[in-house]
Amino acid sequence: MKTEDVIIINNNEIASEIWEMEFLAPKISSNYKGAGQFIQIQLDPGWGNPLRRPMSIASCRDSKISIIYKIFGQGTKILSQKISGDVLNVLGPLGNSFQYKKNNLNILVGGGVGLAPIINLWKELDELRDNSYLIIGAKTKNEHIHSHNPDEHIYLTTDDGSMGLPGTVMEALKVVYENVKSSEVFACGPEPMLKQIQSFVIKNNIPAQLSVESYMGCGVGICQGCIISRRNYKNKNHSYHKKYSLVCVDGPIYSAGDVIFD
Amino acid sequence: MDLFIQQEMLSLIDMSIKIGKVLFKNPIITASGTFGYGTEVSSLVNVSKFGGIVTKSITLNPREGNPPPRIVETPSGMLNSIGLANIGVDQYISKKIPLYSTIGTNIIMNIAGTTVNEYIEIIKKVESVSSNIVGYEINISCPNVKRGGMEFGIDCDLTEKLTESLRKITERLLIVKLSPNVTNIASIAQSAEKAGADAVSAINTVVGMSIDIHKQKSKVYTKLSGLSGPAIRPIGIASVHKIFQAIDIPIIGIGGITCGNDVLEYILAGASAVQVGTSNYRDPGIALSMIEEIKLYGEKYIISSISDIVGVVSSNTK
């Protein structure tokens, strides 16, 4: 991990209230390990917002890193006002990454703000697309950046039925799983979505990796703010001995059976 | 040539300070709970340049800490309620103390207990092993635990009794960390001084609360939590000012320090050293830039030793 002053190349709204920012970050990208890792962005040099904002990496290549974010608070609003040429101080790359097996059938599920690591993994699986399925959920079609295309293994859902399959990602996951069976699920999204996916994969005995979100202070294990409850107390390598896990250093990717959403 | 030599000399402000018998290479120390056990970010920051590191609070038994959510950002600050999560003194001795042999800076162990005996037992355990820990900071001011913690820090007699008991069992540096959540912080400082403390540190977090109006619940699990960051800096400086007028032992100023200028405010108010806390979350190496900023100030105002300006503002009213 390094701190680096990165130069913004692009910062555009790519769907309704969903933005993509790309910046030049040679130091951070040279330490990048894979989809699922995140960075901590300092919003501005002033101290109005003292804490950095954790953002999952949406792509990393040629010394460039991109993030995808949804505007829902003051911090993301500030980010959306940055323009090409602006400099941001960034700490990263942080956390662990998704671990996939080449011969598995991979089902990738992303919803709401949990788009970035899933899209990143989808890009990473480029050569394994025949074995992979992408499911993305949104409230309405304006929030989607892909096209619904089952022939290409891309399934979109909308709560209002305006695009793709009506309903949540769970409807699409059930459909896809019925067809492919033996597989591994990779998911990121709001907690209620992850909770539903967790109970689905546990019930059907499917291996799954979830990228979890947490309110974060430092991102490097010193503040102990970003805990999640653990189901599995056996992993001795954890930062905590028993009940909790630090999302910033043990996560953000966990096996579905390892965590409890409170 | 003469001018050149003069400038060279001016830039050599003596940054070292002494607390009790311990020499610190500079007055900038990391605050308890904001720098882990001191070893987590060694790949990112050269910690040997720090004046010192105060560890997170160590308790007699391991503590998981409070349920989530534990932190939330607030205007120019943050609330936390970690609940003294730590590995406990036995594991601290076996796993962390050995890592300090090459750390290159002063390690101060922060300790917390629920009874006088717990504090005693922790120090006795550490005193019984070989270590390069230079001293103990006694946490009598944590607002986020149900028992102990702040109970001591709001009571002069309890502060005195606890400090006295600990003074008897260690010759290492003894620093009592004070709470701002009291009527008269200077009187608590006097009790610590009377009982033999080498220094006091002030302030711990200010009790605060923040509510999510949509969920209609507290943003932090324990409801009440501790406010830190630049939002509390004026409270910290005022506290140091008051304490400076009441006691003669050194004060370590804490609260919202973000840069060299903030350090200087504390020093001018009466602090011999400072601790940097919340700012470490944003940049674990932030203390290093403060050291450079203070050197520049020393050059500008021709100060030969940082100790020379301790309490300059507060002694005017002493």
Image: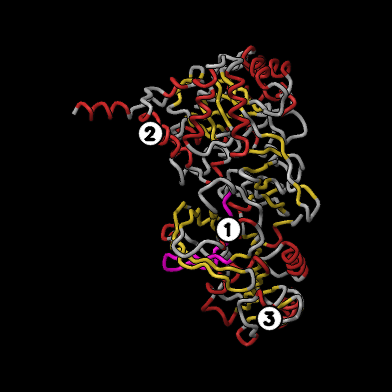
According to the image, label 3 marks what residue?
A180
Quadrant for residue B193, please give it: top right
Question: Does A151 appear above or below B318?
Answer: below
Residue B233 in percent (x, y) is at 59, 34
Q: Closer to the observer: label 1 or label 3? A: 1
* Residue located 76% across and 67% down the image: A196
Amino acid of disc 3:
Val
According to the image, label 1 marks what residue?
A78
Amino acid of disc 1:
Ile
Q: Earlier in the sequence, mark 1 or mark 3?
A: 1
Q: Secondary structure at mark 1?
A: helix
> Tag 1: Cα neighbours inside 10 Å, few (<14), some, or many (≥20)?
few
Say the numbered circle drawn on residue B296: 2
**In terms of depth relative to the viewer, which is nearer, A216 or B105?**
A216
Q: Determine whether, in the image, residue A189 is placed left or right of residue B174.
A: right
The residue stretch that appears in magenta: A51-68
Amino acid of disc 2:
Leu
In the rendered picture of this protein, how many numbered marks are placed on residues? Answer: 3
* Residue located 56% across and 16% down the image: B317
User: Which chain is indicated by disc 3?
Assistant: A
Residue A224 in percent (x, y) is at 63, 45
Q: Determine whether, in the image, residue A64 is placed left or right of residue B222.
A: left
Rounded to the nearest angstrom, the CA distance separating label 1 from label 2 is: 33 Å
Q: Residue furthest front?
A: B317
Rounded to the nearest angstrom, the CA distance separating label 3 from label 2 is: 67 Å
Residue B286 in percent (x, y) is at 48, 41
User: Does the magenta stretch mainly form a helix, a strand or a loop?
Assistant: strand
Q: Determine whether, in the image, residue A29 is placed left or right of residue A236.
A: left
**In terms of depth relative to the viewer, which is nearer, A183 or A73?**
A73
User: Which chain is indicated by disc 2?
Assistant: B
Residue A132 in percent (x, y) is at 60, 78
Say the numbered circle drawn on residue A102: none
